[in-house]
Image (spheres, grey):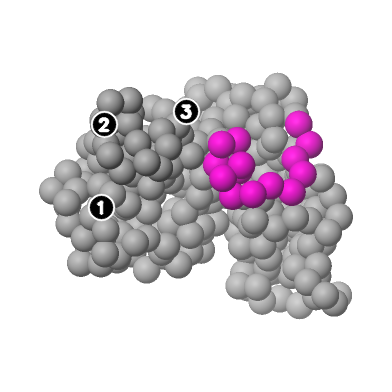
Amino acid sequence: MPVSHAEEGYVTADGRQIGGTLMELKNITLRFGGVVAIKDISFDIRDGEIRAIIGPNGAGKSSMLNVISGFYVPTEGDVYFKKVKRGPMKPYEVARLGIARTFQNIALFDGMSVLDNIMTGRLTMMKSGLLSQALWYGAAAREEYAHREKVERIIDFLEIQNIRKTPVGRLPYGLKKRVELARALAAEPKLLLLDEPMAGMNVEEKEDMSRFILDLNDEFSTTICLIEHDMGVVMDLSDRVVVMDYGRKIGDGTPDEVRNNQDVIDAYLGVAHD
């Protein structure tokens, strides 16, 4: 948890140095017709931190993650990444920018092996043409070997060596979530977005996923922004937390600051506001 803040970053209680602003969202409003999903929200994500977005169901969390990932373009407000204002982008442009994500509903290719699913995370980095890849000769073969080496390191890191050749459709839910994380990591993201990474997991699986998230942040300096309903996980993992309720921001700060915020307490207890 942070103990000091500054524009250029802050230092956590355990001595980790968090850098300056990686992404800034300014006055974000998102409308779908007459429905306001997000209303005038501003916050930032610092380089090297674990930033959580929480809130009751229907608060607008997934919509905000879709804005961050570039899937939604805000109706009002601006998104800055590395101090550059970001306009509408195609998915491959977002990936090349250094942003990757996992999904609340697992989006993998069930008929493909674990290894091949993870390899799809490298597609935007491959330079060989379709024909040379099909022939798998010369530069194309060397390039694939290099990408496979990167993927094998991720497989080792996430401890899924024994299922690397298994079709994803045969895997239990918890391992599928780990494979999806591996595919996102294969893109070598600067900012990793996790949409409910612990959803549907048992206690042991949650402990494993929490460990991997902390190790990713610590060993690879990956900046992480996550949505999660398990408050124990959020408070243990996060450096800072944004709290949303009915599309509004009602809290923003360290886990301790958030858990003692009366508006946050009311929202989670279902207390009506005047």
Task: Tell me the CA gap for discs 3 and 2.
Answer: 35 Å
Residue bearing mark 1: 114
Amino acid at the residue labelled 1: Val
Say which quarter of the image contains residue 23: top right
Amino acid at the residue labelled 3: Ser
67 horizontally vs 41: left or right = left
Amino acid at the residue labelled 2: Tyr
- Please tell me which of labels 1 and 3 falls first in the chain: 1
Neighbor class of circle 1 (other Cα within 10 Å; few <14, some 14-19, many 20+) is many
Residue bearing mark 2: 137
At horizontal 75% and vertical 40% (from top left) the residue drawn is: 86
Which residue occupies the foreground of this view, 8 or 101?
Answer: 101
Task: Tell me the CA gap for discs 1 and 2.
Answer: 24 Å
Task: Tell me the CA gap for discs 1 and 3.
Answer: 25 Å
Neighbor class of circle 3 (other Cα within 10 Å; few <14, some 14-19, many 20+) is some
User: What range of the chain is rendered magenta?
Assistant: 84-97
The secondary element bearing badge 1 is classed as: helix
Neighbor class of circle 2 (other Cα within 10 Å; few <14, some 14-19, many 20+) is few
Q: Quadrant of the N terminus?
A: top right
Can see residue 204? no
